[in-house]
Amino acid sequence: MKLLKVYSRASAPTKIILFGEHFVVYEKPAILAAIEKRIYSSINIRNDNNINLNINNIHEEIDIDNISLLKDQGFTNLTHPLFIVIYDTLMRFNARFGLNVKIDSEVPFGSGLGTSAAVSASLITTIFNLFGMFDKEEIFSLTLNAEKLIHNNPSGADPAISISGGLIIFRKYNDNKMIIPLEYDKELEFMIVYSGEERITGKIVDNVRSMKDKNPQLFEIFANKSEEITQDAIQALKNKDYSLVGKLMTKNHELLNRLGVSSQTLNRLVEHALNNGALGAKLTGAGGGGSIIVLFNADDRNRLLEAFKGNKIFVTKISNNGIRIE
Ligand code: PMV
């Protein structure tokens, strides 16, 4: 494949999971939305064989020939999966050259907003762009492989939304996926409240698997409940019945709490939102920390902003933009 550029920049949206996280790993449906906060990757080709990664004020440089060794040795550093992503994408093009890589995020890492998938998707897209390629299906499968490096059994929901943008129903079937875009209200807003608690998605996904292995019957009851809530939410979103969407979000949070993936802080934040006029609130993503999402009527916007004054928050609409060349 011919190299067409020496510099490239691309971005991918972060996301919220409105319904169905965790159970989506076990082939139940989920609803996800891309949000307006994005992750940007810029790369330029070097004269040597080193990959120089600059992310979140961390600088690290590894010779391309040593990256494949990381795979065998196992990761000792959180940036190592990113080096593998870069390596695997270059190998897709039979390319062996050094790169300066800079990644900038508009949200904190580990905030439960799908940053890991957005980093990989934007990074892979920038490398594809060097060769004049923009194949979403291929970018999806490389992003999914990257997610597998980070946690063993990803559903694929995060890569799917980061690549497509918009509002989607996602369902995994064995090695396949179903993605259905949903119409959405362009004015609809969500408030995102950070808990300040960082967590590692892979660990929480592993905890859920242990719970499932220990108590399969109870897990099945929870999973069916999650599916029922998600199906009701699809209908409520289609009907623009946001009061019902909110109630279902809160119900979904209670279910995730019973599953054991919430935290005292997350429960307190949800409670606080509900006490201040929210239509509904829930943790989003893996849980154990990260963020909550809050749905509200426009009339209650200021009251909620005031109520969460001491917290890190932002308000976002759904973003129609998936991966994009900048
Ligand atoms: O916390 P996040 O943004 O990494 O989302 C994880 C979503 C899970 O459903 C818990 C896992 C998955 O692979 O879908």
Image (cartoon, rainbow, N blue to C red):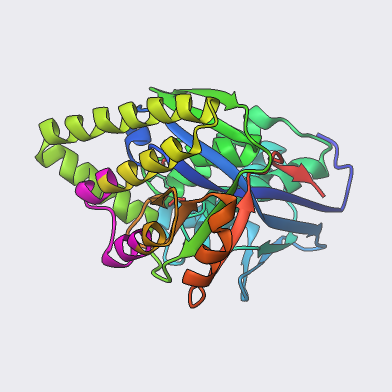
- Relative horizontal placement of residue 319, taking residue 267 as reference (left or right): right
Q: Is residue 121 shown above or below 272?
A: above
In the depicted view, which residue is nearer to us: 162 or 264?
A: 264
Q: Main secondary structure of the magenta part?
A: helix
Is 236 placed left or right of 43 in the picture?
left
Q: In this view, does 129 lie to the left or right of 199?
A: right
Q: Does the magenta stretch include residue 106?
A: no
Q: Where is residue 9 in the image (x, y as percent from the top left)?
A: 79, 53
Nearest to the observer: residue 139 or residue 91? 139
How far across and down, in percent of the image, does residue 30 sit? Answer: 43, 33
How many labels sit on residues? 0
Kindly identify the residue that appears in the image at 75 percent across and 41 percent down. 128
Q: In which quarter of the image is the N terminus?
A: top right
Q: Is residue 308 among what the camera can see?
A: no
Q: Residue at x 47, y 34 (%)?
A: 31
Vertical placement of 44 versus 120: above or below? below
256 in magenta: yes
Please state which of residues 117 and 233 is positioned toward the viewer in this rendering. Answer: 233
Q: Quadrant of residue 121?
A: top right
Q: Quadrant of residue 238?
A: top right
**On screen, 311 above or below 80?**
below
Which residue lies at the image location 37% right of the left edge and 64% below the top edge?
272
Q: Is residue 51 left or right of residue 200?
A: right
Q: For this rendering, which residue is in front, 203 or 237?
A: 237
Q: Can you give x and y, in whole percent of width and height, for residue 162 in the image? A: 60, 42
Residue 263 coordinates in the image, percent (x, y)? 28, 62
Residue positioned 23% across, 42% down in the render: 209
| Residue 249 at least partly seen | yes
Residues drawn in magenta: 255-271
